[in-house]
Image (tube, rainbow, N blue to C red):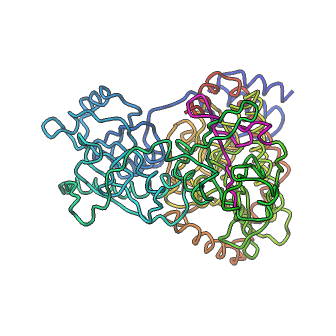
């Protein structure tokens, strides 16, 4: 009876479901589910942030290729300071001129724009406002591939410069600049999302402050000692070529990382069936130095595949080491999508290649496996830290199953008193894996399998009775990844984390038990606002509205150290630990688990309909084919 009525419910418009659902559950003498009613139509306009007062100060226009992580972060940092910001995505030159004429902005900012700005918007005789280019390079650096070259040359320091638009690319007057050390072996996308975004925000806020105080920009002068950059040519495909027969393992890893995640490094393999060379794009490079693994195929030569693990493949290199490649594209172009390497390579290329399982063991705090491994654990005293470093934060069905097993293993360990879910460096989680879904034979069915698998992970988290569980977001999170974090007892983060806690951009209703855990933390009305509006959120805003518990660091650089400090304080505070455990044990009754089961079933009924919709298919394909 209950199931039949739920099926009837899912055929009705979403705006009319709450009262019907309550009547159904009342008929069953069960607790009412605090259902969130959302409209899955995609929203593209920016709107004021939840929990922030907006006081108009400067009217600012953003022109950008897309609303990427830098654009979103800049929007949030400016609007929370009272400025009005309007984002115009992928504008033509005509559109730029029209918006400037209509909106009469005080400042024009191009945080991520590869198109040329119309001359009349920056020429001194015709401009009405300063037009700033956010350039991902140090002062004097010019060219299209600044980050790529910085990583190629393994420079110890890089930066971001805010400069005026000009006839000659990146040669305009400089409004501000910010630099940072490159202390880690980062990919291009990781450096951009973390250090570049941080420096860009510092430089942008400084430029706004200079504008407010009438401080003029300085001309670009290569005779000045602090101008260390220079013009760099567009990086050619040959610069991204991986040659297994001539390049060392370190050189290969560096080439892949400087091209990851766009456009990718290039490798050629022999097609044994036709004798031709096949060009592929490769991503996710990791060094392998273990002789026992490399010697699995003792007669292998440089460029041969000698092992595979969780979708990645291990190539032998000329220096008798190995390089794991986690992802590939069959070729360059928008009709190909990025997938685990074993899904792109042909069966004959993988013939005889042994699957080497991950050794998911505990490492001392701060250490990680010296191999390709998506899930690993740290342990310090009675605290387990679970890291899940999935490519771009996407969690496939198979990855969810493995993560659930590791969480269960910690759950069953009587010597562990607290579990910390760390996610990955760049992303905590972004929910289901749309690329693998799109590549499957039946995307609707694989979507269903994937959402159930991630729901099982969430269930594993909230079913832990005798340990305190903390979600510690060191990286950004989106959609189901945000909601998954809320199932923990405590949610911590740092001030540089960016959240996209909504599903609408993918035409989905949402799952991960969000209709219970989100309203439980922020209330029904704020929960509805969050999921109805396709608007990003800063971690500090999440704390302000009660969605997260606290920020423990100002940025990524300080997060690891402060996480260790905060966890030591928590587990040594016997009273706080006991209070948290008493609270959850009191809550975790049979009725509570039945209530959560109803939330899950209701969300999945809605998602099942979404997975069959044309809107979801189009949104998914637009996302994965780029």
Q: Where is residue 321 in the image (x, y as percent from the top left)?
A: 69, 61
Quick check: can you spot residue 281? yes
Direction from residue 262 to residue 430 in the image, left or right: right
Q: Which of 167 and 423 is in front in this view?
A: 167
Q: Name the image quarter holding residue 103.
A: top left
Answer whether residue 40 is visible to the viewer in this image.
no
Q: In the depicted view, which residue is nearer to us: 37 or 167?
A: 167
Q: In which quarter of the image is the C terminus?
A: top right
Instruction: Answer with left or right where residue 511 lies relative to residue 73.
Output: right
Residue 4 drawn at (x, y percent):
83, 25
Where residue 338 sits, quadrant-wise, is top right
Magenta range is 321-350
Q: Nearer the viewer, residue 468 or 505?
A: 505
Is residue 425 magenta-colored? no
Quadrant, the N terminus: top right
What residue do we see at 63% from left, 41% from top? 268
Q: Is residue 342 magenta?
A: yes
């Amino acid at each position: 009876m209950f199931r039949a009525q739920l099926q009837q419910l899912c055929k009705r418009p979403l705006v009319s479901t709450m009262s019907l659902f309550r009547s159904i559950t009342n008929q069953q003498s069960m607790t009412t589910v605090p259902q969130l009613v959302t409209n899955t139509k995609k929203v593209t306009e920016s709107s004021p942030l939840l929990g922030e007062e907006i006081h108009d100060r400067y009217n600012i226009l953003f022109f950008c290729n897309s609303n990427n992580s830098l654009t979103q972060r800049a929007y949030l940092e400016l609007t929370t300071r009272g400025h009005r910001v309007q984002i115009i995505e992928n504008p033509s030159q005509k559109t730029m001129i029209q918006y400037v004429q209509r909106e009469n902005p005080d400042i024009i900012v191009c945080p991520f724009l590869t198109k040329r700005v119309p001359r009349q918007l920056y020429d001194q005789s015709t401009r009405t406002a300063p037009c700033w280019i956010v350039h991902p390079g140090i002062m004097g650096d010019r060219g299209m591939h600044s980050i790529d070259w910085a990583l190629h040359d393994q420079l110890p320091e890089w930066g971001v410069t805010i400069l005026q638009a000009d006839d000659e690319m990146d040669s305009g007057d400089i409004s501000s600049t910010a630099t940072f050390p490159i202390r880690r072996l980062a990919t291009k996308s990781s450096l951009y999302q973390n250090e570049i975004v941080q420096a860009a925000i510092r430089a942008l806020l400084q430029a706004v402050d200079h504008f407010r105080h009438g401080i003029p920009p300085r001309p670009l002068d290569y005779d000045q000692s602090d101008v260390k950059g220079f013009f760099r040519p567009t990086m050619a495909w040959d610069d991204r070529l991986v040659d297994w027969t001539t390049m060392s393992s370190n050189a290969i890893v560096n080439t892949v990382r400087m091209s990851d995640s766009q456009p990718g490094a290039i490798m050629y393999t022999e097609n044994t069936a036709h004798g031709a060379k096949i060009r592929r794009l490769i991503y996710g490079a990791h060094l392998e130095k273990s002789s026992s693994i490399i010697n699995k195929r003792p007669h292998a030569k440089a460029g041969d595949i000698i092992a595979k693990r969780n979708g990645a493949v291990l190539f032998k290199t000329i220096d008798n080491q190995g390089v794991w490649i986690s992802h590939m594209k069959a070729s360059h172009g928008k009709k190909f999508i990025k997938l685990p390497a074993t899904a792109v390579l042909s069966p004959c290329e993988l013939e005889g290649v042994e699957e080497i399982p991950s050794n998911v063991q505990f490492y001392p705090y701060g250490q990680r496996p010296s191999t390709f491994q998506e899930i690993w654990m740290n342990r310090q005293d009675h605290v387990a830290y679970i890291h899940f470093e999935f490519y771009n934060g996407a969690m496939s069905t198979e990855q969810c199953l493995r993560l659930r097993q590791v969480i269960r293993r910690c759950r069953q360990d009587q010597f562990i008193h607290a579990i910390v879910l760390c996610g990955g460096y760049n992303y905590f989680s972004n929910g289901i894996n749309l690329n693998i879904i799109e590549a499957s034979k039946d995307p609707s069915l694989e979507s269903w399998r994937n959402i159930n698998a991630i729901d099982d992970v969430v269930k594993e988290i909230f079913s832990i009775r005798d340990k305190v569980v903390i979600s510690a977001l060191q990286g950004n999170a989106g959609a189901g990844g945000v909601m998954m974090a809320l199932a923990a007892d405590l949610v911590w983060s740092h001030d540089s984390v960016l959240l996209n806690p909504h599903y609408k951009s993918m035409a989905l209703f949402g799952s991960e038990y969000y209709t219970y855990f989100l309203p439980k933390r922020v209330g029904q009305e704020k929960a509805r606002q969050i999921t109805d509006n396709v608007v990003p959120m800063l971690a500090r805003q999440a704390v302000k509205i009660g969605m997260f518990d606290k920020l423990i660091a100002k940025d990524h650089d300080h997060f690891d150290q402060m996480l260790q400090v905060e966890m030591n304080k928590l587990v040594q505070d016997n009273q706080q630990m006991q209070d948290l455990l008493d609270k959850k044990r009191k809550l975790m009754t049979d009725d509570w688990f039945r209530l959560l089961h109803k939330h899950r079933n209701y969300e999945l009924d809605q998602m099942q309909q979404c997975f069959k919709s044309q809107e979801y298919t189009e949104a998914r394909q637009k996302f994965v084919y780029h």
